[in-house]
Image (cartoon, rainbow, N blue to C red):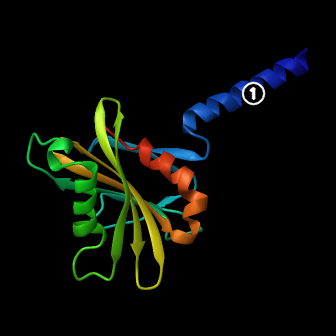
Amino acid sequence: MIRKIAVLVLIFSLGLYGCATGVSGLQSYVDSTDGYEFLYPSGWLPVKVTDGPDVVLHDIIEITENVSVVISPVPEGSTLAELGTPGEVGYQLQKNAIAPPNSNRQAELVNAEKLESRDKNYYILEYSVKLPNEQRHDIASVGVSRGKLFTFNVSTTEKRWEKMHDLFETVVKSFSLD
């Protein structure tokens, strides 16, 4: 009987741990000041940035795998739909941020779709990005809140994309704005 109770306590404890960490293997990041949150792979570390993204985290082993949040102003009261369709916003992001003119990058918008979560709309955008020495794959979630455009991006090498696709799609779809 004591053994059964010990096993039940262990199972209950592991169940609580799973609830605290969200999805297995993922940790929660919350920025209550700017009003966003997301899940990211356990073991990833923050990178100090002085200009550009609001936050960057990267894998400690595959250091080029990363997540980032970029916050940009939009006209007050603007909605995501007013900025354009998923394809239009994806193209603008491609042209102005992922592969801007005179950069050494080429990008192709592979997929663009709308996602509704917690009564907010997001665009999920997927890119194939060619750099001089490597091919990368990015997936982003874009949303508008508080007069700002939030771009949450996850990036990896093309050779790891197949392995990381499902995990990174879960990460991108976890991004939410208050």
State the residue in front, 111 or 121.
Answer: 111
Graded by Cα atoms within 10 Å as few (under 14), some (14 to 19) or many (20 or more), the crowding at tag 1 reads few
Which image quarter is the C terminus in? top left
Quadrant of residue 62 within the rendered picture: bottom right
Query: Residue placed at 22% from the left, 50% from the top?
Result: 149
Query: Residue placed at 66% from the left, 29% from the top?
Result: 15
**Callout 1, which amino acid?**
Ile
Is 17 left, or right, of 52 in this rendering? right
State the residue in front, 119 or 147.
Answer: 119
Kind of element beneath mark 1: helix
- Viewer can see residue 30: no
State the residue in front, 105 or 7.
Answer: 105
Q: Residue furthest bottom?
A: 132
Q: Using the image, determine if residue 24 lies above or below residue 134.
A: above
The residue at which mark 1 appears reads as 11
Is 8 left, or right, of 42 in this rendering? right
Q: Using the image, determine if residue 35 lies above or below residue 70.
A: above
Q: Using the image, determine if residue 83 lies above or below residue 119.
A: below
Q: Position of residue 21 (x, y in %)?
A: 56, 39
